[in-house]
Image (spheres, rainbow, N blue to C red):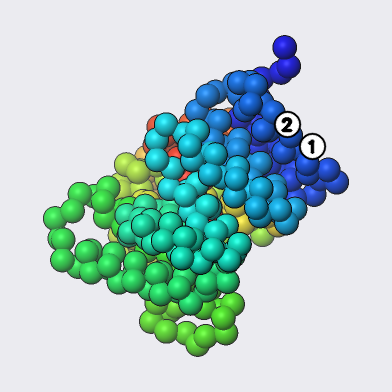
Amino acid sequence: MSELLTADRIDELGALGAKSPDPAALVAELVGAVDEGRVADPDDTGYALLVAADILVQAGDLADALTLTTRAIAEQPEDDPYARSKRGGLLLRLGREDEGLAELTVLRPLLETDPDATYLIDDLADAGRTDTALEWLTAALDAILERTRTQQHESEDAQDEAAAMTYGLAQRRHDLREDMGLPHDDYDNLADRLRAASDHALDALDDGPATLLFWPRAEFEALLARWPALADDFPATWDEHRAQIEGALANAASLGGADLGVVAGTVAGLAAFAGDDPIDEETLDEYADSLDEAGVTAWPPGRNDACWCGSGSKYKKCCLPRSRS
């Protein structure tokens, strides 16, 4: 019997897709494993088909990519909005405007509730519908900020999620408007301020391979409670903090950085390190350098491994999508 197709192998084939001299062979391996029931984890069947469809898109075969995407939706036991968005985008690109826009419009509310849903914007933009993409991003930001203003008693998790979504949507909107040559507006200014908050993490990567100092949720809250003056050096919420770290690491990796990782800080450890000295950005950097290398968590983890941030969720469901924001 032929080898089982693992999640790691699916990822490997997907990474090869853009540069392979024989994309058809990669597609054949993926689809063949699905047809023969050789996907190691049956839950990855739809994912294998979507990766195959993406390879076909890169090769310019949109019609066959649509067929595989439609099949991926049918193969998955639960509704998959990501796959449906891909299908809608492909329909648009194939000139089936009414069908494609209808498919995507049904998913539009996800932009207000799902931090990962910016794939809708990507699919609209790839199909040349940048005006629609911009309209949807603006409406989603309006709705989220209005909800934040009027629902004062939301849980802390809900507030953190709203902050993360605001960050991701504002950055995507900013980049899209910049590509369109549009002048800055209030949301673009907001995006600039949020992006500036990640400068501290990015600066730590200037000298090459680096480990970033990360504060787990309880430690993050204790840190700012003990030294309120540090609030200017950190984002407003822990969720933004971990999004900042994930984004900085993804940025470094895209620039060729290697041996990247995170090391968790503790308030007790920082206090012992600094003694009576004031706690400032330079002290934080020195404290990070002092931490034992044995405590470093390598980045990135595998898609199905526990996320580096300590949430207990798989990386692919937790911080991985933040690096695409």
Q: Which residue is more in the foreground, 304 or 205?
A: 304
Q: Secondary structure at mark 1?
A: helix
**Could you tell me which residue is drawn at 55 percent across and 48 percent down?**
212
Going by the numbered disc 2, the residue's amino acid type is Glu
Q: Does residue 181 appear to the left or right of 107 in the view shown? A: right
Q: Residue 170 is drawn in which quadrant? A: bottom left
Residue 243 rendering spot, x and y as whole percentages: 46, 53
Q: Residues within 10 Å of mark 1 (few under 14, many from 20)?
A: few
Residue beneath the point at 23% across and 69% down: 146
Residue 295 visible to the viewer: no
Label 1 – label 2 distance at C-alpha: 6 Å
Whether residue 103 can be seen here: yes
Residue 36 lies in what quarter of the image? top right
User: Residue 129's x, y, as percent?
Assistant: 52, 72
Residues tagged 1 and 2 counted as in contact (Cβ below 8 A):
yes
Residue bearing mark 2: 29
Would residue 226 appear left or right of 285 to someone viewing this image? left
